[in-house]
């Protein structure tokens, strides 16, 4: 009986201790919850303040930019005209084989250096208000295998006609034109295509189709750009690309001397010369007249580069990586200075062959048309605004 009493007392004691422990834990939990909700409030407040601050800064930068723009517009148009005349003179000089004496030559070199430095400074007057940059690759699709290891395929990047064009090889004169992507994918080889025979063979894989015209580099001693009207089959314009001592623009795609590219802003030429041999240069072209509007030297090396494309005035250069089946965007250059190399997106392109022979951006669809070892591949891009970090 006594033992039973002791047992009951012990149990009661244990229960009251247990209750005390539970009460204690509950109080602690309530205190922690209180603190967490305070932290939440504080974090929210900081985030709001940070957002507001960022908005203020962006607005201030915008007004500053506008002021700068108005100041520079006049200077720019003058500068462009002077530049163009200068380049034409340069070109004529090389054609006529003029031999200036050594002193003058030295000065010329000095002048050219300053011209090159100032080349990058002139503010680019954008034709559109696009400000997109890549954030990632959303999807990839292998559509077909037609043609040899090297070539280029694309849709018309300007007109939205939906037609698909195939340039097989790096030296040919026959384009295959498909009525639509569906025709392209369902066609047995090129059986459903209309063939377009160009008046002269192309060179490399840097051509483009823009507003029902094919733009391509003609085979030959001089660098002649041809603008060919696909609707009535005639050459509507041609121009010598006025650079001296050109070198292949990408070291891994040696057939391509000039890579013509299109984006929201229009037509561009990506090229390289002996003068800036290690780096890639860029020119904005007038798609109507084939005039050069502005030129830049980019910091992007040619070495180990395989292809490039342009989005909203930003060049993305794609390089071979140590991993054999992947290439990567490793250098970007933005003509409006909003994207720097530090913002280069970590974008990989899977590949089969030693290098992509062409990558072409279509601004109407935000797709990249790639040619890899005879396979025609589409990459779907996810975009973000240039200002967002
Ligand atoms: C594509 O070009 C390769 C040579 O690069 C040639 O062997 C092949 O027959 C061509 N294919 C078509 C469909 O024109
Ligand atoms: C083809 O069309 C363009 C403009 O649409 C015109 O300038 C050119 O003269 C035409 N060429 C021929 C041969 O009809």
Image: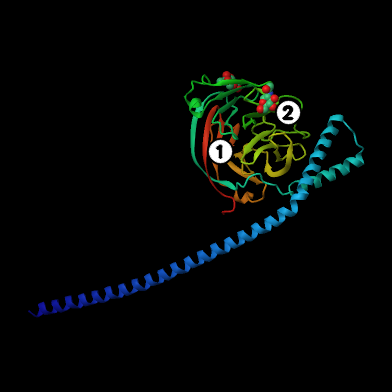
**Residue 333 percent across, percent down from the top left:** 65, 45
Give the structural element (helix, strand or loop) at label 2: strand
The residue tagged 2 is 238
Q: Earlier in the sequence, mark 2 or mark 1?
A: 2
Question: On residue 206, which mark appears?
Answer: none
| Mark 2 surroundings within 10 Å by alpha-carbon count, few (fewer than 14), some (14 through 19), many (20 or more) | some
Q: State whether label 1 is within 8 Å of ligand 2.
A: no
Q: Is residue 350 visible?
A: yes
Percent from the top left, x then y, of residue 319?
61, 39
Horizontal arrangement in the rendering, residue 27 relative to residue 129 (left or right): left
Q: Residue at x 85, y 33 (%)?
A: 93
Comparing 379 with 82, the one in front is 82
Residue 121 image offset from top left, x and y in percent = 74, 49
Looking at the rendered structure, the secondary structure element under dot 1 is: loop
Q: Residue at x 60, y 62 (%)?
A: 56
Q: Residue at x 66, y 34 (%)?
A: 260
Number of the label disc, if any, that sits on residue 364: 1
């Amino acid at each position: 009986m006594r033992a039973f009493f002791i047992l009951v007392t012990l149990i009661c004691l244990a229960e009251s201790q247990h209750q005390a422990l539970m009460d204690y834990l509950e109080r602690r939990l309530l205190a922690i919850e209180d603190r967490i909700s305070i932290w939440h409030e504080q974090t929210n407040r900081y985030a709001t303040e940070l957002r507001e601050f960022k908005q203020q800064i962006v607005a201030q930068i915008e007004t500053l930019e506008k002021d700068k723009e108005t100041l520079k517009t006049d200077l720019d148009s003058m500068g462009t005209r002077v530049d163009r005349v200068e380049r034409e003179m340069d070109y004529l000089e090389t054609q006529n084989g003029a031999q200036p004496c050594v002193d003058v030559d030295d000065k010329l070199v000095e002048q050219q250096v300053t011209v090159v430095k100032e080349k990058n400074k002139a503010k680019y007057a954008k034709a559109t208000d696009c400000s997109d940059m890549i954030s990632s690759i959303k999807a990839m699709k292998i559509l077909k295998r037609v043609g040899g290891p090297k070539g280029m395929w694309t849709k018309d990047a300007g007109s939205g006609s939906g037609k698909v064009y195939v340039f097989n090889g790096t030296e040919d004169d026959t384009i295959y034109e498909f009525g639509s992507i569906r025709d392209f994918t369902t066609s047995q080889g090129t059986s459903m295509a209309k063939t377009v025979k160009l008046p002269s063979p192309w060179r490399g894989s840097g051509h483009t189709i823009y507003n029902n015209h094919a733009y391509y580099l003609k085979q030959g001693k001089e660098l002649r750009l041809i603008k060919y009207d696909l609707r009535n089959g005639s050459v509507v314009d041609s121009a010598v690309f006025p650079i001296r001592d050109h070198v292949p623009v990408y070291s891994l795609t040696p057939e391509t001397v000039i890579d013509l590219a299109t984006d929201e802003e229009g037509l561009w030429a990506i090229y390289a010369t002996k003068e800036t041999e290690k780096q890639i240069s860029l020119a904005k072209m007038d798609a109507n007249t084939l005039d050069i509007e502005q030129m830049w030297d980019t910091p992007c090396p040619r070495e180990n580069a395989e292809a490039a494309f342009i989005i909203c005035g930003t060049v993305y250069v794609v390089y071979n990586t140590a991993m054999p089946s992947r290439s990567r965007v490793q250098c970007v250059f933005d003509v409006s200075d909003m994207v720097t190399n530090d913002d280069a997106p970590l974008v990989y392109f899977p590949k089969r062959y030693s290098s992509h022979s062409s990558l072409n951006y279509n601004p109407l669809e935000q797709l990249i048309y790639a040619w890899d070892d005879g396979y025609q591949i589409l990459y779907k891009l996810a975009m973000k605004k240039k200002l967002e970090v």
